Image (cartoon, rainbow, N blue to C red):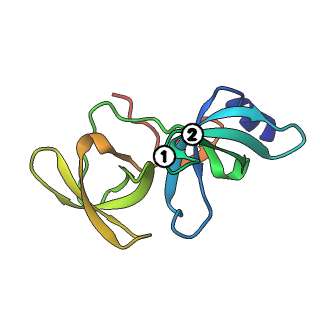
Amino acid sequence: MMGEEKNLFRKGAEVEVSFDEEGFRGSWYTATVIRTVSKSNKIFVEFNTLMADDRGTKPLREFVNLILVRPIPPREPNPIFQLSQEVDAFHNDGWWEGVVTAVLENSRYSVFFRSSREELQFLNSDLRLHREWVGGDTWNPPLQQG
């Protein structure tokens, strides 16, 4: 299993990284694998949206534990979300887990975030169906073949 995962996270692979820190739980940030570390469960990544400096000119680079890394989840081509559906919303430079609390006009949705207790509005294009990565190439729920 670990060998299979290390292959998914080889140099140049696009991944998502989660942080197990207060204020970041339930969020995922896109990154590119810079290098793998042999004999370790860590990889070195460069984040796409998180910056290392206040001016926003230098991308954050960090060693991260493989437990906190997953491939980029698949996206439905034209998703339509429903009330109470679990979604990820692109907010504050990352994808945050939330629940649809209202379906509004013009492809807009109201989403509640348990982690921050906030409710915000998003366009359809800034949402995706929430998925958990099971491992290998398996997502739950799976991508709808259409």
Q: Residue at x 62, y 63 (%)?
A: 20
User: Which element type, helix, strand or loop, lies under badge 1?
Assistant: loop
Res 115 → quadrant = bottom left
Residue found farthest to the bottom: 117
Please state the horizontal and vertical placement of residue 16, each as a whole percent of the image: 56, 43
Task: Tally the numbered discs.
Answer: 2
User: Which element type, helix, strand or loop, lies under badge 2?
Assistant: loop
Q: Amino acid at mark 2?
A: Lys
Residue found farthest to the front: 55
- For the residues bearing labels 1 and 2, Cβ distance under 8 angstroms: yes
Left or right of 76? Residue 66 is right
C-alpha gap between disc 1 and disc 2: 8 Å
| Label 2 crowd (10 A; few <14 / some 14-19 / many >=20) | few
Location of the C terminus (image quadrant): top left
In this view, the residue in front, 22 or 41, is 22
Please state the horizontal and vertical placement of residue 59, each as a whole percent of the image: 57, 40
Which residue is disc 1 drawn over?
Answer: 55
| Label 1 crowd (10 A; few <14 / some 14-19 / many >=20) | few
Please state the horizontal and vertical placement of residue 112, each as a whole percent of the image: 31, 65
Which residue is disc 2 drawn over?
Answer: 58
Res 125 → quadrant = top left
Q: Residue at x 57, y 46 (%)?
A: 133
